[in-house]
Image: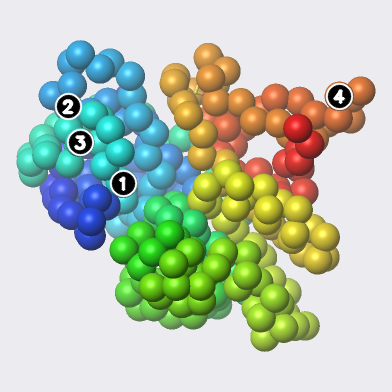
Amino acid sequence: MQSGVIISNTRLQGDYFKVTFYTPEICATAQPGQFVHVKIANMEEHILRRPFSICNVSGSGELEVVYKVVGAGTEVLSKLPEGTLCDLLGPLGKPFQAPAADEVPVLLGGGYGAAAMFMLTEKSAQPGVVLLGARSKNDLLLIDDYKQSGFEVRLATNDGSSGIKGLITELLPPLFADYAGKKLHFYACGPMPMLLALCRILPEKGYPEAEVSLDHLMCCGVGACFACVVKIKADNPDGFRYARTCSEGPVFAAKDVYLGE
Ligand code: FES
């Protein structure tokens, strides 16, 4: 187990915050798509840890997490001041594979899924494209950070307040046309319906290099409790098996995700 000292904890926009921990040991080995399991300080009555995707790490030991206040745990976290010491487990989980030198990375982030893939911008030999989708412009995150990284940013919102009006998957046909002939490597994180749609669309369209991060409710975070299982295709009579997102994922190949009921 490692510890992390909060060195900043600020509101990004609306209910979204960014907390930065000083935790050099975790930063030394963290890869894109991995997460940390955080025991939130000052929550003795809630002993469960909470998983948070790693947004970015620095060579000087700073680890960034973007989170949304959605309940008691994140509410307490949002109020922790600089200097607070937290227990952290990590880095945990199977990471995304870095794109090959000849591949254009295409990241698809739904809501704060945008944060779970940001480290890929630093693992890519060439800048790529990021497609961000959300309910409204207030839920689109890290647009300027992605632009500064050199990635092209395309947007979709359900209410049309930014980018096209519609689902993030509606950004795909023009992308396929604009990047025809290029070798694309897709990465996605966001709500489950969006990820399942991508698991269907991308292999069908002939893009075998597609990975999805299946964020799921977690308990132990280390493969012991089976609270976090998802269905993965398997060569058995059912056609699927249960895989633990915390230890066998959260990143899976899109072609391996079971799409039946
Ligand atoms: Fe316990 Fe995944 S959270 S096995």
Cα separation, mark 2 vs mark 1, equals 16 Å
Residue 25 in which image quadrant: top left
* Image point (70%, 76%), residue name: 173
Instruction: Pick the residue in front: 146 or 7.
Output: 146
Residue 245 in which image quadrant: top right
Q: Position of residue 164 (x, y in %)?
A: 51, 76
Cα separation, mark 2 vs mark 4, equals 43 Å
102 in relation to 168, above or below: below
> To which residue does mark 3 refer?
75
Q: Quarter holding the C terminus?
A: top right
Cα separation, mark 4 vs mark 1, equals 36 Å
* Image point (65%, 78%), residue name: 175
The amino acid type of the residue labelled 4 equals Asp
The amino acid type of the residue labelled 1 equals Tyr
Please tell me whether mark 1 sits on a helix, a strand or a loop: strand
Residue 238 got which mark? 4
Can you tell me whether the CB of the residue at mark 3 lies under 8 Å from the nearest atom of ligand 1? no
Residue 158 got which mark? none
Can you tell me whether the CB of the residue at mark 2 lies under 8 Å from the nearest atom of ligand 1? no
The answer to whether residue 255 is left or right of residue 150 is right
The amino acid type of the residue labelled 2 equals Ala
Q: Residues within 10 Å of mark 3 (few under 14, many from 20)?
A: few
> To which residue does mark 1 refer?
67
**Residue 102 seen in the figure:** no
> To which residue does mark 2 refer?
41
- Sequence-first tag of 2 and 4: 2
Q: Position of residue 28 (x, y in %)?
A: 37, 46
Cα separation, mark 1 vs mark 3, equals 10 Å
In the rendered image, the residue lying farthest to the bottom is: 178
* Image point (11%, 39%), residue name: 79
- Sequence-first tag of 1 and 3: 1
Residue depth check, mark 2 versus mark 1: number of the one nearer the observer: 1
